Amino acid sequence: MKNFLLEQQQKSERIGILTEFIHSHPEARELKRAIAVKMVLQGEPYSQITKLVGMNKSCITNWKQRFEAEGIDGIKLGYKGAKSYLTTEQHTEIITWLREKEYCNIDELVNYLDENYGVIYQSKQSYYDLLSSAKISWNKSQKINPNFNPDLVKIKREEIINFLTQNQAEIESGHLVVFFVDECHLLANDVCGYVLGKTDIRIEILIKNIKDKQTYFGALDYKTQEFIVHEYPTGNSSSTVNFIKYLQNQRPGKRIALIWDGASYHRSDEVKKFLSSVNDHHQPDQWQITCIRFAPNAPEQNPVEDVWLQTKNFLRKYWHLCKSFSVVKWLFKFFTNHQEFDFPKLHQYEPCSDLK
């Protein structure tokens, strides 16, 4: 009986200490710990405490034990009276918490350990070890268009395949030439990127004017896989028409099909007027220039995007040759113009992928 009364007296004293501490307006994390421990001492169920303060049972038990052993100092921030370590159970809880999050950073993890477990590591490597255990590491973020429509991409792919199937004989005979078309706006600093170099020397690339740029129109021949590129002052309707005429000169006497994106200058009145001038006297199946659009907001459909990427990687690989933007432009065209490119993406538009 005496032991019971003594325990009740000690519990009452502890609750009083916690109440006084809570009323002293402590830091928010200290306040949350004090409220959680007080509720435990008052006999509140853990489920209710967890819901109120957002702290799991293991954390609550940890702070209760700290308080019972060290008093108020045990739940204060930056307290050094206890060894900073995690139990196996706590380690598992943290890994689960990390895996459930959509994103995380070191600062957030540091605050979480301090707030919920009172653990502060001296070395950041300990935090990185936790991230590694949760299979979280540095990754390059990838852009994605929120308007991307996979269903429309599928429909457009089927449309392109149907067109190629229906015109397979014309393509095989060479009477119809199919081009995948895209534009690249080369910038002076496109030569900058990850390169191999000595760790004790900073790699610097001379760029006289970072605003230097050059627009290229490129067309990948579906059958021969030859890439044709031509430079223009900018990407607009006039350049588009001139590039189509350039392709006609490259394939004289041939009907041409252009598969490209829905850029505004691909759909402009000037381009429509030009197409009418070359197509009006022919039936649709005999048009001199046929245009097919990819689905919007999905540049990955176009194999020419891979050509541009490979070309820029080439420039970065040979950055030491890029002494001026004139050299950069020369290398760009040297690597692309009248070269053959064969990408897996090109073969998704069967049945003509084996025509070469």
Image (cartoon, rainbow, N blue to C red):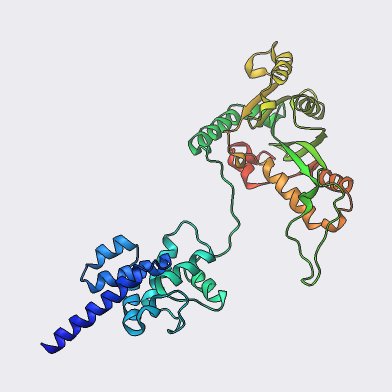
Q: Position of residue 246 (x, y in %)?
A: 81, 28
Can you say whether 293 is above or below 202 in the image?
Answer: above
Relative depth, front residue between 24 and 74: 24
Q: Position of residue 348 (x, y in %)?
A: 58, 41
Q: Position of residue 341 (x, y in %)?
A: 72, 45
Quarter that holds the C terminus? top right
> How many numbered marks, from 0 up?
0
Q: Residue at x 71, y 48 (%)?
A: 309
Q: Position of residue 177 (x, y in %)?
A: 71, 29
Identify the residue at the far left of this view: 1
Relative depth, front residue between 186 and 84: 84
Relative depth, front residue between 199 and 66: 66
Can you say whether 236 is above or below 125 in the image?
Answer: above
Quadrant of residue 202 in the image? bottom right
Q: In this rendering, does residue 12 appear at all?
A: yes
Quadrant of residue 171 in the image? top right
